[in-house]
């Protein structure tokens, strides 16, 4: 799970793993790991700090994973450009070639935000090739569309077992 600082990665992972949403999270220092359970599947998720000083670690944490989730704050329109640059730079790493990517536009509960289509354009998702790319709008706070995220994850987890 990657994305700029304040995108909502830690909140999302807390909610996905059965915890409550909290407003007053502190920025992640390094990373944090939690298990997400769905039916009989248990998925190990790493949530990596998004501050600039942690971004050089992203590639190392992503090597060999089943899937990469890239979380974006869709209400923070000024940071979309930076999100796009970081996303493309990580997707260009040869070690991560072919790993499925799920982009999550988080904070859909807020009033001023970009739509999923606008997010796809702003991040130039069509310019990412050699892998499967999906994009959903979600809210960790209101638990909107999280079932779709879980289903997507379970499908990728099962694919590797085959
Ligand atoms: N309105 C709204 N706020 C959210 C949502 N998800 C997270 N937030 C808020 O966004 C802020 C940052 O959330 P975090 O989960 O700490 O962000 P992060 O991506 O883990 O940040 P780093 O650890 O620094 O990389 C917190 O104040 C959350 O309450 C959401 O779905 N809706
Ligand atoms: Mg965090």
Image (cartoon, rainbow, N blue to C red):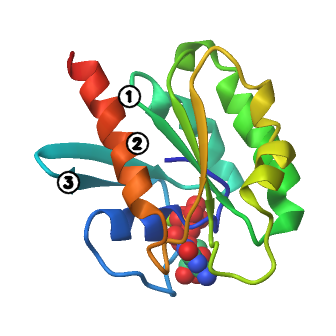
| Disc 2: residue Cβ within 8 A of ligand 1's nearest atom | no
Please say whether residue 28 is visible from this viewpoint: no
Residue located at (41% from left, 81% from top):
21
Residue at mark 3: 37
Residue located at (56% from left, 64% from top):
138
Q: Secondary structure at mark 2?
A: helix
Label 3 or label 1, whichever comes before in sequence order: 3
Determine crowd level at label 1: few under 14, some 14-19, many 20+ residues with C-alpha closer than 10 A.
some
Where residue 10 sits in the image (x, y, percent)? Answer: 46, 65
Label 2 or label 3, whichever comes before in sequence order: 3
Where residue 122 sits in the image (x, y, percent)? Answer: 85, 48
Determine crowd level at label 2: few under 14, some 14-19, many 20+ residues with C-alpha closer than 10 A.
some
Determine crowd level at label 3: few under 14, some 14-19, many 20+ residues with C-alpha closer than 10 A.
some
Front one among 94 and 108: 108
Q: Secondary structure at mark 3?
A: strand
Gap between marks 2 and 3 measured at Cα? 13 Å
User: Does residue 130 sit above or below 115 in this rendering?
Assistant: above
Numbered marks: total? 3
Residue at mark 1: 66
Quadrant into which the C terminus falls: top left
Gap between marks 1 and 2 measured at Cα? 11 Å
Please say whether residue 123 is visible from this viewpoint: yes
Q: Which quarter of the frame holds ligand 1? A: bottom right
Residue at mark 2: 152
Taking the view exactly as shown, the residue that stands out farthest to the left is 40
Residue located at (78% from left, 30% from top):
126
Q: Nearer the viewer, mark 1 or mark 2?
A: 2
């Amino acid at each position: 799970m990657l994305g700029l600082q304040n995108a909502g990665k830690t909140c999302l992972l807390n909610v996905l793993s059965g915890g409550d949403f909290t407003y007053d999270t502190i920025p992640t220092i390094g990373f944090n790991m939690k298990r997400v359970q769905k039916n009989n599947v248990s998925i190990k998720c790493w949530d990596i700090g998004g501050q600039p000083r942690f971004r050089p670690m992203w590639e190392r944490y992503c090597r060999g994973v089943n899937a990469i989730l890239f979380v974006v704050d869709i209400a923070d329109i000024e940071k979309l450009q930076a999100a796009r640059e970081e996303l493309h730079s990580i997707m260009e790493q040869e070690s991560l070639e072919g790993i499925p990517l799920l982009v999550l536009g988080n904070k859909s509960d807020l009033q001023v935000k970009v739509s999923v289509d606008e997010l796809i354009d702003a991040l130039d998702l069509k310019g990412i090739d050699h892998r499967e790319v999906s994009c959903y709008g979600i809210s960790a706070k209101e638990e909107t569309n999280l079932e779709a995220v879980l289903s997507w994850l379970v499908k990728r987890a099962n694919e590797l077992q085959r």
